Image (spheres, helix red, strand yellow):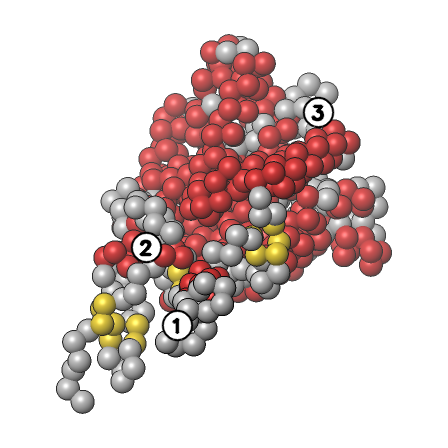
Amino acid sequence: MTADGTTKSPRGGTVRSRVRGRYAARGHTGEARGADGATALPSTDRRRLVLVLLLAVTVGVFTATVPLLRDWFDLRVYYGTVDAWIHHGGRIYDYRVPGTTYGFTYPPFAALGMLPMALVGLRTAIVLALLLNLAALAVVVGFLVGPALRRHGWFGLALTACLLPLFEPLRDTFSFGQVNLVLLALVLADARLLARGHGRWAGVGIGLAAAIKLTPALFIALLLLGRRRRAAGVATAVAGAATGLAAWAAPDASRFYWTDALWDTGRVGRLAYVSNQSVQGVLARLAAPGEPSRALWATAVLLVLCVWAWRTSRALAADDWAAAFALTGLAACLVSPITWVHHLVWLLPSFAVLLRHRRLRIAAALYGVLCSSVVWLWFDDASGLDGFLGSNIYTWITLGLLAWLPVGEAVRTGTGRAAALVPPAVGARRPAERLPGGRRARVTRRHREAADPASPSGADPNDVPQVRRAAPGPP
């Protein structure tokens, strides 16, 4: 017994200090700490509430002054197309928004999916689109960072609710009335099915997304690259069936789209427009007012696809399907002829990967740039070195993430043990853990569920139990 009433431990130090040190080693210090160990977040509910209120005010001022509101323009295109087709006998690809040259540019199946808008007025359609996008965003956030948000409770949810409206691609998706979040949710639903081993229905979401908009078709190539032939077959069959249904319902529109409209990028918009943050957009701004070289663009696309295949293969070799899906979203944005700023919601899975790998400063810096609307400074003139660097900065971010996104690296928890990012594929072999002397460690089901952030049990990865030691083998 010491002078202050604590008990002396036989191992040295007091029992109290040893218990305190043990809790500190597990991260239970009563303070939120950053990746470098420094206090990063307030530790009391009162301070957290103050931070959330300050952020909410900042977001309100920002959204009221900085962003360009799009007046539901794309939703007006969808609504006008369906209205003209159903109520006035018009053709899907003949409709133009009054006073503009813009009309419907998606495959005919997308128009079939939007038929319910023919039953309501424009204002009701806007409200329904907002609700649908909010639901899709909730699904996306739940898939990407749901376990982490549950661990942080109301504070994590409040911070997320404050930070997401700042992200320009999200702001534009909502104010245009776009469908990108719905497509992302469909694709991530397949990612979740694959991660949890429910491969029977995997591919349905990717197939539907590819039938609505062609860009997600690259995820079918991902399934093939990852040897998920059944899921790739399901995705291809679903996309083909949806396209066939559209051809039966609107044969003339289908014929026109696949033979004419698909190849006419002028229907979508100007390639050199600053919002086009694809490789083609970079080349178009360099060549403006002329036309970019198609051969140069094809070469650049081939190089991007080679980098994607190489990096994705590394992710798949490490059973890191989270990184594989994130890399595929990045590549799809780069190789598409036109990638408007609102299409960059496909970067959200990459930010989830950065957070899981504790690259907090990099994630914060890139997220800040994508919140800034900085590319619009070169709306009128993207010439010169500053125009080349500044007007394409979202493309540079996408390229940088494609090249350097963390792949297959273990994330250390507060206990020093590695937590699994995404469960491996069905039938995939987990890397065997080794004990001293080279013997294998047998991993129990409880250990797998605790290490899996998506586990139905909801176990905290920081509380992963120790693996059961295998019986000693012969020397």
Q: Position of residue 431 (x, y in %)?
A: 31, 69
Q: Position of residue 222 (x, y in %)?
A: 41, 55
Label ID, residue 304? none
Disc 2 is placed on an element classified as helix
- Who comes first in sequence, dot 2 or dot 1? 1
**Can you identify the residue that label 1 sits on?**
9
Q: Residues within 10 Å of mark 3 (few under 14, many from 20)?
A: few
Disc 3 is placed on an element classified as loop
Q: 203 or 318: nearer the eye?
A: 318
Disc 1 is placed on an element classified as loop
Q: Quadrant of residue 448?
A: bottom left
Q: Residue at x 28, y 78 (%)?
A: 435
Q: Answer whether residue 395 is visible to the viewer in this image.
A: no
Q: CA distance from mark 2 to mark 1?
A: 32 Å
- Who comes first in sequence, dot 2 or dot 3? 3
Q: 248 or 303: nearer the eye?
A: 303
Q: Is residue 160 above or below residue 75?
A: below
Q: Answer whether residue 385 is visible to the viewer in this image.
A: yes
Q: Nearer the viewer, mark 2 or mark 1?
A: 1
**Can you identify the residue that label 2 sits on?**
450
For this view, does 322 lie left or right of residue 282?
Answer: left
Q: Residue at x 82, y 59 (%)?
A: 385
Q: Amino acid at mark 3?
A: Thr
Q: CA distance from mark 1 to mark 3?
A: 80 Å
- Who comes first in sequence, dot 1 or dot 3? 1
Q: Residue at x 45, y 19 (%)?
A: 115
For this view, does 231 lie left or right of residue 117?
Answer: left
Q: Amino acid at mark 2?
A: Ala
**Can you identify the residue that label 3 sits on?**
100
Q: Nearer the viewer, mark 2 or mark 3?
A: 2
Quadrant holding the N terminus: bottom left
Q: Residue at x 77, y 31 (%)?
A: 65
